[in-house]
Image: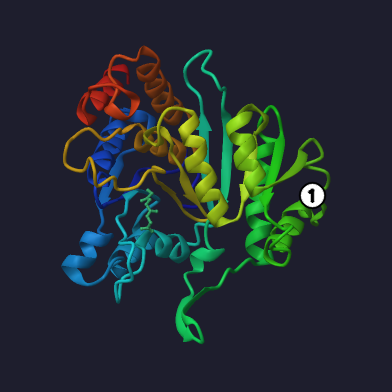
Amino acid sequence: RTLSTAARQSLRIGLIPADGIGKEVIPAAKAAILALGSDIPNPQFVDLAAGWETFTRTGVALPQETVDILRQECDCALFGSVSSPSRKVVGYSSPIVALRKELDLYANIRPVVSVLVGEKPSVDLIVVRENTECLYVKQEVQTVGEHGKEARATRLITERASRRIGQMAFELANARPRKLLTIIHKSNVLSVTDGLFRETVRSVPTLPGVNGKYDQVTISEQLVDSAVYRLFREPEIFDVLVAPNLYGDILSDAAAALVGSLGLIPSINAGDNFVMGEPVHGSAPDIEGKGIANPIASIRSAALMLRHLGYTKGADRLDTAVDQVIREGKVLTPDLKGTSTTNEVLEAVLRIL
Ligand code: GGG
């Protein structure tokens, strides 16, 4: 993990398809990585269990063995999608939320980009979502009060997590041509929690050691509701958006709607020592097993993961192949108004690779 790409003799990738269409799209990402040949040094794959189905079989949603193998034996991982139930199930807790915490993958980086030339609106943005706290600490309680049931959730925002997601967002913004960073919050209402997030991210350029590194970054801020409105009205104004966990989750799905399909949008969960690619889409029970899930988000997630590790050439080849398939518009899954299957899209990508 700490090796440079040149020094690495092989790349061990944990594969956690989890539930639903994750089982259909993660194998496609694996095939695409294998097609990169010598651009990736001796890729080796380790199949790992997690998810609702794993829970129903074993009583555990995230087996300790999965966490241990990822920590001890893998350089990186690809996660598919999870089907957590909407009701409370005793003993069950979302494995993806737990995995992000276990591996301290504090940044969820979600690029949303229009591919078609002249596509309107023109979108080229990255949502940088804090990945470990906010309402996702999942501290919920239900009690009975004077007027019946009462439910409460703790929303945790810490200076440490806000600072490190802020640093990640400034780094990303600084590396892009427009260098615009928008901080998303609702601190006019949640002045303590969102106020801390906003202030801490804003203070990143003044941290010791920064020494003017981010002087070229233009910082702005938007209340989350206004950000959603402007995202739909004029998405081209956004470059890098940094947000607490829940707002980032919602904003990135919303942005996906502007570029055709959630089935196109990749992400990485990144920490200081590990990276895990993950399509933004969920397990899609409505199309599970039909062989028509779009594999592009997973292939692009593999590309993002490889790019994060320094395998730029392999990552570029995956992105270029996928972009060509989208631009040609002949082999597309139904979410993009096509009639092709997962395998046909994968085959089209592999032919270009
Ligand atoms: N790949 C993203 C994904 O699986 N999304 C579904 C999701 O977030 N489900 C909520 C959960 O199970 O934690």
Name the amino acid type tagged 1.
Answer: Pro
Residue 284 in the image: above or below residue 186 = above
What is the total number of numbered labels drawn onto the structure image? 1
Q: Position of residue 323 (x, y in %)?
A: 42, 21
Direction from residue 195 to residue 77 in the image, left or right: left
Residue farthest to the front? Answer: 147
Badge 1: how crowded within 10 Å, few (<14), some, or many (20+)? some
Direction from residue 10 to residue 202 in the image, left or right: right
Quick check: is the Cβ at mark 1 less than 8 Å away from ligand 1?
Answer: no
Tell me which residue sits at (71%, 35%) in the image.
180
Direction from residue 339 to residue 225 in the image, left or right: right
Image quarter of residue 176? top right
Q: Nearer the viewer, residue 76 or 298?
A: 298
Q: Position of residue 3 (x, y in %)?
A: 48, 48
Q: Secondary structure at mark 1?
A: helix
Tell me which residue sits at (72%, 58%) in the image.
187
Tell me which residue sits at (78%, 42%) in the image.
213
Q: Position of residue 337 (x, y in %)?
A: 31, 23
Q: Position of residue 347 (x, y in %)?
A: 23, 23
Residue 133 in the image: above or below residue 258 = below
Q: Is residue 310 visible?
A: no
Name the image quarter holding the C terminus: top left
Q: Is residue 137 visible?
A: yes
Residue 70 in the image: above or below residue 225 = below
Colour treatment of the image = rainbow
Residue 349 in the image: above or below residue 46 = above
Pointer 1 residue:
205
Tell me which residue sits at (28%, 45%) in the image.
284
